[in-house]
């Protein structure tokens, strides 16, 4: 279980993106979607759970963040990484190798696993996520969506109990988003705990158990998917949220405007000389 008890945090030198008096419990195996306008604090919550706050991002922290009853900030990063896997918005920021197989194996390699176990785990990861065609590739030759798949695979190979994803769809096309949804469906079926900070909501409506809406660093509402769908389009727009069903989204109809003549000729006579 993940618990945030009276958590407040402010970044050094910043007046936004902080948190104010957050109280939240997340059960094992639960998928929780954090949403809200940019700067509302959803990414900050993920950084608290994976230990990046306060070990990497400095600021003033009050309250406690507990994972399985233990305060996460008191553990070294390598111990946290064995339990909590993170997939960032820009996958390039978490790569340590230039080829895909080495990147997938990087985390488990740092756990000093035997070579045969590394090979087996990389093969199993590629098969489970259906990314065999991305094996033995140069990372710098991959598309943005393919890089995101490798970033997810490197976390999946370590088999953490908790997955944190920070706007994982931001650089993906529609096909890649559908594939990401299937990866999330897979780990949820395995009983993993999943926390996702996202702006795009539609692809997560069938996966999220709860939706936490934040505004200016405070939790303003917690919804089930059914309750969230009951919000009107106007209410979601006022909350700064995107659509939950793309089938209801249509491009605006352009207004019919009388054409303005670019060239006009009146009473023109033309004769060519012989």
Image (spheres, rainbow, N blue to C red):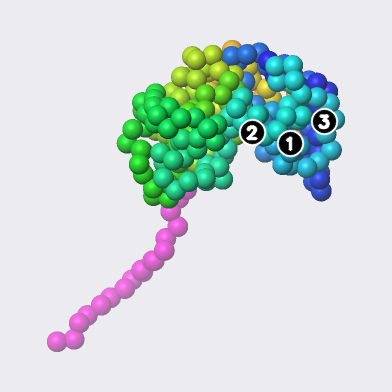
Local SS, label 1: helix
User: Could you say where residue 4 lies in the image, as x and y percent from the top left?
Assistant: 76, 22
Quadrant of the rendered structure where residue 48 is? Answer: top right
- Segment colored magenta: 256-274
Membership of 269 in magenta stretch: yes
User: Could you say where residue 217 lies in the image, as x and y percent from the top left?
Assistant: 77, 32
Q: Which mark is residue 78?
A: 2
Disc number lying in front (3 or 2): 2
Q: Which mark is residue 8?
A: 3
**Residue count near mark 2 (Cα–Cα under 10 Å), binned few <14, some 14–19, many ≥20:** few
Distance from the alpha carbon under mark 2 to that under mark 1: 14 Å
Disc number lying in front (3 or 1): 1
Locate the N terminus by quadrant: top right
- Mark with earlier residue (2, 1): 1
User: Could you say where residue 92 lies in the image, as x and y percent from the top left?
Assistant: 52, 46
User: Could you say where residue 112 lies in the image, as x and y percent from the top left?
Assistant: 53, 32
Disc number lying in front (2 or 1): 2
Query: Residue visible at 63% across and 13% down?
Result: 28
Local SS, label 3: strand
Query: Residue visible at 50% across and 20% down?
Result: 187
Distance from the alpha carbon under mark 3 to that under mark 1: 12 Å
Residue that label 1 marks: 53
- Mark with earlier residue (3, 2): 3
Query: Residue visible at 50% across and 41% down?
Result: 171
């Amino acid at each position: 279980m993940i618990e945030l008890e009276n958590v407040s945090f402010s970044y050094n030198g910043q007046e936004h993106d902080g948190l104010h008096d957050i109280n939240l419990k997340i059960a094992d195996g639960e998928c929780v979607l954090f949403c809200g306008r940019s700067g509302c604090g959803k990414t900050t919550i993920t950084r608290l759970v994976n230990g990046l706050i306060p070990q990497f991002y400095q600021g003033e922290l009050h309250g406690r963040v507990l994972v399985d009853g233990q305060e996460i900030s008191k553990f070294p990063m390598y111990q946290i990484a064995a339990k909590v896997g993170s997939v960032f918005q820009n996958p390039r920021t978490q790569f340590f190798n230039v080829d895909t197989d080495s990147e997938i194996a990087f985390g488990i390699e740092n756990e000093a696993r035997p070579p045969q176990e590394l090979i087996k785990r990389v093969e199993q990861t590629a098969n489970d996520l259906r990314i065999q065609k991305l094996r033995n590739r140069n990372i710098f030759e991959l598309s943005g969506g393919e890089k995101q798949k490798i970033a997810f695979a490197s976390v999946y190979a370590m088999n953490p109990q908790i997955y944190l994803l920070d706007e994982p769809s931001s650089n993906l096309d529609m096909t890649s988003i559908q594939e990401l949804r299937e990866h999330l469906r897979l780990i949820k079926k395995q009983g993993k705990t999943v926390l996702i900070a996202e702006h795009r909501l539609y692809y997560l409506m069938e996966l999220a158990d709860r939706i936490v809406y934040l505004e200016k660093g405070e939790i303003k509402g917690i919804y089930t998917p059914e309750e969230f769908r009951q919000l009107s389009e106007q209410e979601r727009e006022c909350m700064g949220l995107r659509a939950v069903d793309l089938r209801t989204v249509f491009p605006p109809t352009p207004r019919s405007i009388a054409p303005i003549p670019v060239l006009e000729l009146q009473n023109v006579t033309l004769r060519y000389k012989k």
